[in-house]
Image: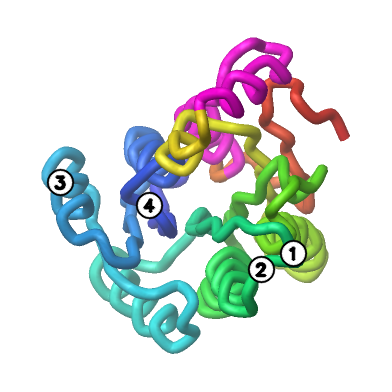
Amino acid sequence: MNNSIALVTGGTRGLGRATSIALQQAGHSVAAVYRSNDAEADRFHAETGIAVYCWDICDFEACGSGVERVEHDLGPIGVLVNNGGITRDAALHKMSPAQWQEVLRTNLDSHFNMCRHVIEGMRERRYGRIVNISSINGQKGQFGQTNYAASKAGILGFTRALALESAARGITVNAIAPGYCDTDMVASVQPEVMKAIVAAIPVGRLGRAEDIARLVVFLAREDNDYITGATFSTNGGQYLS
């Protein structure tokens, strides 16, 4: 078991919260990154003891400074989970440039920002595990989400390319494409829409954050060195690709 340092963006709420806790339980020292909700981050730290760090993952320089702080406090980052993401839904003919840009910067540019600042250290140490959180809607598309679907589809291509670049250096790069999970983001969906969503899931329920977290822990294992460039569709059978 490799007790390496794991950094999780969007790591104090939803999928990120469950992932941070699961990695901690698997023996990793975890840094959970958040953007603005200090009160939620403080509660999370008090409940779990997991270190929390605040910075904007859209900001390349902030990511660099943040990674330096984590590595100063905890040690070299061996596991990176790119989980931070947002939605700004609208049909394209009503979507503003700001809605497009904010989602692409948060959901896709952040992967470059974070990976760029950890990849050299991983290459030097010849070890790393990178897990990128995409979405079912990056695979199949979704009405009103051209921005979100584009960002999440972009993550899949980014994952494959970085996996090819990194394999010879002992670094694996994989993506998880969750279906609809029982998180705050999905909780805002109208009840009649939610009923239709659940009806379309063959296993008959929404995903749980822990379903995704268990897969992250598996992909982060030190002995899991032969799976790279893969996308894991974790959606209860709702979309098979």
Q: Which mark is residue 141?
A: none
Residues at marks 3 and 1 touching, judged by CB atoms closer than 8 Å: no
The residue sitting at 39% across, 37% down in the picture is: 18
Point out the frontmost of discs 2 and 3: 2
The residue that mark 4 highlights is 11
| Location of residue 74 by image quarter | bottom left
Instruction: Give the mark, 3 or 1, whose residue is nearer the N terminus.
Output: 3
Q: Residues within 10 Å of mark 4 (few under 14, many from 20)?
A: many
The residue that mark 3 highlights is 43
* Element carrying mark 3: helix
The CA span between labels 3 and 1 is 38 Å
Residues at marks 1 and 2 touching, judged by CB atoms closer than 8 Å: yes
Give, as a three-letter code, the residue at label 4: Gly
The CA span between labels 2 and 3 is 35 Å
Compared with 79, 241 (above or below) is above
Q: Which residues are magenta?
A: 191-219
**Residue 62 appears left or right of 115:** left
The residue that mark 1 highlights is 92
The residue that mark 2 highlights is 95
